Amino acid sequence: GAGVSQSPRYKVAKRGQDVALRCDPISGHVSLFWYQQALGQGPEFLTYFQNEAQLDKSGLPSDRFFAERPEGSVSTLKIQRTQQEDSAVYLCASSLAGTGRSGTEAFFGQGTRLTVV
Amino acid sequence: SQQGEEDPQALSIQEGENATMNCSYKTSINNLQWYRQNSGRGLVHLILIRSNEREKHSGRLRVTLDTSKKSSSLLITASRAADTASYFCATDARGNTGKLIFGQGTTLQVKP
């Protein structure tokens, strides 16, 4: 596609509910990143995929957060048993380069705004 | 955790004036990037400066990097109302996979 696409744009979840956030990266992009952005803050790294391999998940805040990219394209970020502190904008980014090829521009999606009530 | 701080947190100027934003970071880097984020939207890449570069220009943007002070500045010349947005610096630390560590951001308002 023309850019990184994320869905849904907005999600309201009741506390304790499971949610799944989808990211469609730019076709052919090797790297895919998930970030969490709290209101008024900069994005914080959650996890990184190179193709289908999840190479870094050091930023996932708890074991309730799980991400996958089974075919090396579309990725899903799943949050189980959502809590109010999970309320944030979840941003997905993709880039052409793989590991060790830093310095390549990352393209961000519009984000999914999750509100846990 | 955030890599560093941006200064100022908020900036309000008149159209036509220049805007300068500063960013400090903590670790050694491969490169530093600046992004813009309009309200409720995703981030847009503006410019990348590598660790062996000291200054870079792109249109009305000028970025400087001082690795000895672990700091960078973004200058927007002849600002326009459309430049109103939040601006973030992001570092790509050495040894990383290309993941970015963002600052807190500077909110710029350009008044027409």
Image (spheres, grey):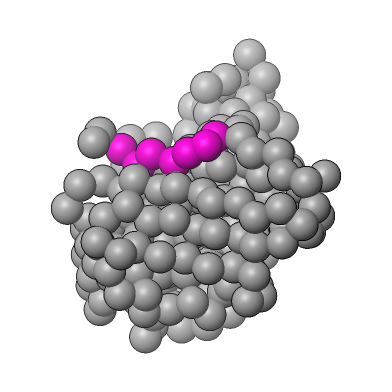
Q: Is residue A25 left or right of residue A41?
A: left
> What residue lies at 72% left-to-right and 44% top-to-bottom?
A13
Is residue A39 or residue A75 the one in the foreground? A75
Q: Is residue B76 left or right of residue A95?
A: right
Instruction: Specify the farthest residue to the front.
Output: A17
Report x, y in % for residue A1.
23, 36
Is residue A19 or residue B56 the one in the foreground? A19
Residue B87 sits inside the magenta stretch: no
Picture quarter with the N terminus of chain B: bottom right
Report x, y in % for residue A112.
56, 42
Report x, y in % for residue A92.
45, 52
Is residue A45 or residue B90 the one in the foreground? A45
Magenta span of residues: A3-9
- Number of numbered discs visible in the structure rendering: 0
Q: Is residue B93 left or right of residue A4?
A: right
> What residue lies at 53% left-to-right and 68% top-to-bottom?
A66
Residue A106 is drawn in which quadrant? bottom left
Whether residue A100 is visible: yes
> What residue lies at 78% left-to-right and 46% top-to-bottom?
A14
Q: Please say if B95 is above or below A11.
A: below
Residue A54 is drawn in which quadrant? bottom left
Q: Is residue A3 left or right of residue A80?
A: left
Instruction: Specify the farthest residue to the top.
Output: B112
Is residue B40 or residue A111 the one in the foreground? A111
Residue A8 sits inside the magenta stretch: yes
Report x, y in % for residue A11.
64, 39
Picture quarter with the C terminus of chain B: top right
